[in-house]
Amino acid sequence: MRKGYLPSVNEANILYLVLGLGLFFIGSIVQQIEMYSGLLITEYVLILIPNILYLRFRGFSLKKVLKLNPITIKQVVYTFLIIVFAYPIAVLANYILITLVGTISTTFPTGVPIPRNTNELLIGYFVIAITPGICEEVMFRGTLQSAYSKLGVKKGLIISSVLFGMFHFNIFNLAGPTFLGLILGILLIKSNSLFISILGHTFNNAIALTLGFFISQVTENLEQIVEQGPMLPEGIELIATFIVLGGIALFSGIILVLLIKKFPVTKVVDTSEAINDEEGQIEEVYSIEEDKKITWLPIYIIGALFIYANYRFLFF
């Protein structure tokens, strides 16, 4: 067992760089070949397995770093409700960003394929909901948020959430995931369990997939209704959309805050100085000084790739 069970900030930065490069150069290619199999390769081979191997190779305890602690049914119910009411806010955040980007470019991403039947929907639940829920949570709320918490709990929450949003390499899908990362990070802190953030991530993606599926089933009828109805000026239509989405998001936000405040918190022993390891010995946790000065160069590299990828997509 390593003395000091959390990875250093520098190690977290390097891990983020390595996995980000894998996603950027390999994940994008395999997903273009075939979306679902490409997503499975990306999530398990390029994200989950390297993350687990890194923790094991460096001698960290998976249970401690990833917070693999038990959860309660009540926490699961609250998690589901929190994600339900957080979802409209994430949608609004993405919509605002899409609208702003739309003022300088008319190019938009296609996104993941919408299931056309029940079988595809069930497959989608596994590939698009459960798989990212496990693999991405191990990386971001598990390894990265734990490592960055050495800078402070709030800083760890914010940094890991922003990096989560940027990891999608899609400016149209930046605001929503960043907000979701904050919610999942808060749930992790309150529950002290990665299982809760995994469930929250899975619930969020399942909701998006389900809504997309049912909306696609009635799209033709909606198009007919819209075509037969009066045409609104583009500006008026945009304002109306903002009012509707904003109203729903405001109502959801009020409920969301109340739910987060009422979330059943798991009380943990203060580990700011020491904890008991599996052998009953005392080991330092947060008082370990990093060997080198923190360098954020790996994060800057991924940030540059994010800007480059979106610039090429929008303007070429």
Image (cartoon, helix red, strand yellow):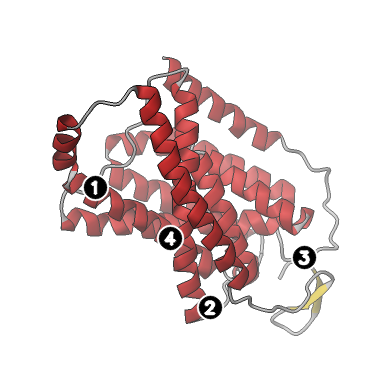
Q: Say whether disc 4 or disc 2 marks the residue closer to the N-terminus.
A: 2
In the picture of the structure, the residue carrying the numbered disc 1 is 215
Q: Amino acid at mark 2?
A: Ile
Q: CA distance from mark 4 to mark 2?
A: 19 Å
Q: Is residue 218 placed above or below 139 in the rendered structure?
A: above
**Farthest bottom residue?**
280
Asked if marks 1 and 4 touch (Cβ < 8 Å), the reply is no
Q: Amino acid at mark 3?
A: Gly
Q: Nearer the viewer, mark 4 or mark 2?
A: 4
Q: CA distance from mark 2 to mark 1?
A: 34 Å
Q: Residue at x 44, y 40 (%)?
A: 243
In the picture of the structure, the residue carrying the numbered disc 2 is 71
Residue 228 falls left or right of residue 284:
left
Q: Say whether disc 2 or disc 1 marks the residue closer to the N-terminus.
A: 2
Q: Residue at x 66, y 54 (%)?
A: 157
Q: Residue at x 71, y 71 (%)?
A: 1
Q: Amino acid at mark 1?
A: Ile
In the picture of the structure, the residue carrying the numbered disc 4 is 84
Q: Say whether disc 3 or disc 2 marks the residue closer to the N-terminus.
A: 3
Q: CA distance from mark 3 to mark 2?
A: 25 Å
Q: CA distance from mark 1 to mark 4?
A: 17 Å
Q: Residues within 10 Å of mark 3 (few under 14, many from 20)?
A: some
Q: What kind of element bears circle 4?
A: helix
Residue 219 falls left or right of residue 313:
left
